[in-house]
Amino acid sequence: RNQEDELRQAIAEGQFEAYYQPRYLSEDMRINGAETLLRWHHPSRGLLLPEQFIPLAEETGLIVPLGEWVLREACFEAANWTDDLVVSVNLSPLQLRIGDLYLVIVSALGDSGLPANRLELEITETALLQENESTLDVLNRLKSLGLRLAMDDFGTGYSSLSNLRNYPFDMIKIDGSFIAGMSLSVENHSIVKALIDLGRGLRMRVTAEGVETLEQLNLLLADGCSELQGFHMSHPLPAKELSALLSKAR
Ligand code: G
Ligand code: G
Ligand code: MN
Ligand code: NA
């Protein structure tokens, strides 16, 4: 109750900040996008990470207004980026079920001037578990705007293969837990290779998340993974630091 009020107040007072973690194209290791990751500047507890407040936001339904704030923030920020970088935004299952996500996105794009093809929505398989016709309907309507859909944390959920076939995804994001294990065991590496091949067979792009070492990076490049994200290349950055990195790279 107390924490819920705190969270509500934080949204009203703008205590959140969007960080952006660069994503790199494997061909030339240039940045071609970034994932938006929330931070909360808590007045007494300091900088909080999503795992410390997203669960509460989901339980209380406050993820809906918070998610709307992030979407708008990310679109306005990305509209200023050099080049045609794609901005990814994580969606919670609740955002697909309540509130008018379609209208929120149409107005975020319209107000910011960001072209739809530069916005990507990351959806976990868990969101599709509460599967109903309207989820597919919402995703198809969003796709028809021209934006991109990514399946997040791939490999950790359920019924992944039928979801990949039935939903209009453009991208698979391989969960970092598989990447962490790939240089440790042949089995883990086999899973990663299979996921990359699966994506390729379905004509989807594949991002490896949680790339932490040069050894992992080299394996992923050899295996034909299309995009890479993780601490080895860059941590999530405040908007200003990402902009500085982008202008330096040009
Ligand atoms: O940055 P960090 O690794 O702590 O993020 C942890 C998790 O929190 C990520 O897996 C991400 O999916 C989730 N997360 C971060 N930002 C957002 C957001 O804006 N909306 C939702 N729904 N989840 C987010
Ligand atoms: O949406 P998702 O849960 O995939 O969000 C990615 C999360 O993983 C973010 O919280 C981000 O801070 C974190 N992350 C990003 N790169 C790395 C990495 O290389 N290693 C680890 N352990 N976590 C990472
Ligand atoms: Mn994500
Ligand atoms: Na993920």
Image: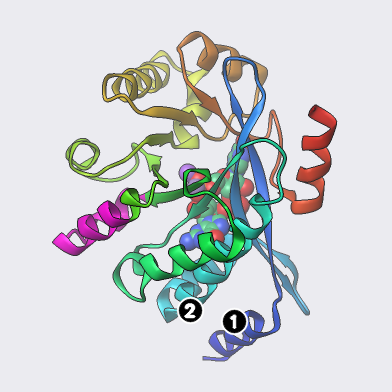
Judge from the rendering whether residue 130 lies leftward or rightward of residue 125; answer left or right: left
Residue 73 falls in which quadrant of the image?
bottom right
The residue most toward the top is 222
- The amino acid beneath tag 1 is Leu
Q: Residues within 10 Å of mark 2 (few under 14, many from 20)?
A: some
Query: What residue sits 67% from the left and 24% below the top?
Result: 30
- Report if residue 130 lies within the magenta region: yes
The C terminus is located in which quarter?
Answer: top right
**Residue 241 drawn at (x, y percent):** 81, 46
- First-in-chain label (1 vs 2): 1
Residue 51 in sight from this viewpoint: no
Q: Main secondary structure of the magenta part?
A: helix
- Report if residue 196 lies within the magenta region: no
Q: Residue 27's mark?
A: none
Q: Which of the two residues, 84 or 188, is positioned nearer the viewer here?
A: 84
Secondary element at image label 1 = helix
Judge from the rendering whether residue 33 lies leftward or rightward of residue 208; answer left or right: right
Residue at label 2? 62
Residue 170 falls in which quadrant of the image?
top left
Q: Residues within 10 Å of mark 1 (few under 14, many from 20)?
A: many
In the rendered view, would you say 41 is above or below 235?
below
CB within 8 Å, label 1 to label 2: yes
From which residue to which does the magenta span run?
Answer: 124-141
Residue at label 1? 7
**Residue 92 drawn at (x, y percent):** 41, 62
State the scheme by which the image is colored: rainbow
Query: What residue sits 75% from the left and 52% below the top?
Result: 239
Residue at mark 1 to residue at mark 2: CA–CA distance: 8 Å
- The amino acid beneath tag 2 is Leu
